[in-house]
Amino acid sequence: MNKNKKLLMLPIAIVFTIIVLTASPLFALASDDDEGYVPRLTAPDSSIPYYSTELNWYHQTGTPMPNCVAYAYGRIYEMNGEKPLIPGGNAGEWYGMNQRGGYYPYGQEPKVGAVACWSRHVAIVEKVNKDGSVTISESHWGGTYFDVRTYQDMSSHFGQTFYGYIYTYNHGMTTQFRNKLINAKKETNTQYKQNTNVAPSDVGEFSITNLDREAQSDSTDNLLDRLFS
């Protein structure tokens, strides 16, 4: 390979490496300063599809809110715009199910958009505060429909055992598109680039093709149609 070709390949390889690392579940964990995250600090309307029989698995199976898992399921759906990967189960099972199934990254550090898991409860991390405290939103089986609480010590929640966090927030990237980027082969990475035969000012540092944009937005477009029709 001559010198000119090597120089041409270098920026493409750098861009591809950056986008794959950004898309990877290991690097796509939500953070407390994530500008794209919109916290939910008020109760969701029961007509919102994510929390109703239209899209919520728990609502469909007869266990709607007030119910911590029904709320967490709907909140994940709402923040990501796609169906949660965790396939049902009760609150105490979520952390172990996720570990065994490999659905989302998990750990002990609080991140916005993560599911906080206890032995009999789950909640959503809405804020990680500068003093180290964590603000969560939640619902309670047979009790309060929705509330927001702030904890310094997550293990103190109703005296339950705290398991950890499931990092469910994906920064708005659909699972389908994320997997496409992760599994892309180096020799075919040009499918993710715009045509370079245009003025540099007309394109950003990285952009997906129109075909990819349509594939990425299919799931969210349908949901938006339901929300605003």
Image: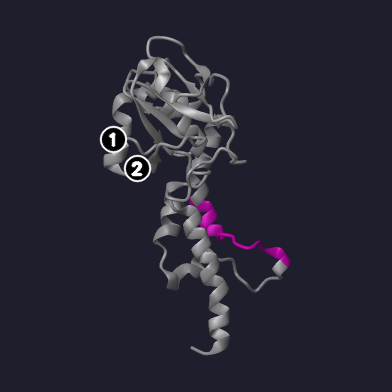
**In-image side of 63 versus 77 (left or right):** left
Q: Is residue 95 above or below residue 187?
A: above
- Residue range of the region highlighted in magenta in the rendering: 201-215
x, y percentage for residue 32?
Answer: 56, 37
Q: Residue placed at 47% from the left, 43% from the top?
A: 219
x, y percentage for residue 196?
Answer: 62, 72
**In-image side of 136 versus 104 (left or right):** right
- Read off the residue under disc 1: 97
Q: Give the structural element (helix, strand or loop) at label 1.
A: helix
Q: Residue furthest top?
A: 143
Note whether residue 229 is visible: no
Whether label 1 touches label 2, CB < 8 Å: yes
Inspect the magenta stretch and tell me whether residue 209 lies in it. yes
The crowd level at tag 1 (other Cα within 10 Å; few <14, some 14-19, many 20+) is: some
Note whether residue 170 is visible: yes
Q: Amino acid at mark 1?
A: Met
x, y percentage for residue 173?
Answer: 50, 47
Earlier along the polypeptide chain: callout 1 or callout 2? 1
Residue in the foreground of this view, choosing between 118 and 143: 118
Q: Residue placed at 39% from the left, 60% from the top?
A: 183
Where, by quadrant of the figure, is residue 130 drawn? Answer: top right
Q: Is residue 5 above or below residue 101?
A: below
The crowd level at tag 2 (other Cα within 10 Å; few <14, some 14-19, many 20+) is: some
Which mark, by number, is residue 2? Answer: none
Q: Residue placed at 59% from the left, 33% from the top?
A: 38
Residue in the foreground of this view, choosing between 174 and 98: 98
**Quick one: quadrant of the C terminus?**
top right
Which mark, by number, is residue 103? Answer: 2
Q: Is residue 129 above or below residue 182?
A: above
x, y percentage for residue 122?
Answer: 39, 25
Q: Amino acid at mark 2?
A: Tyr
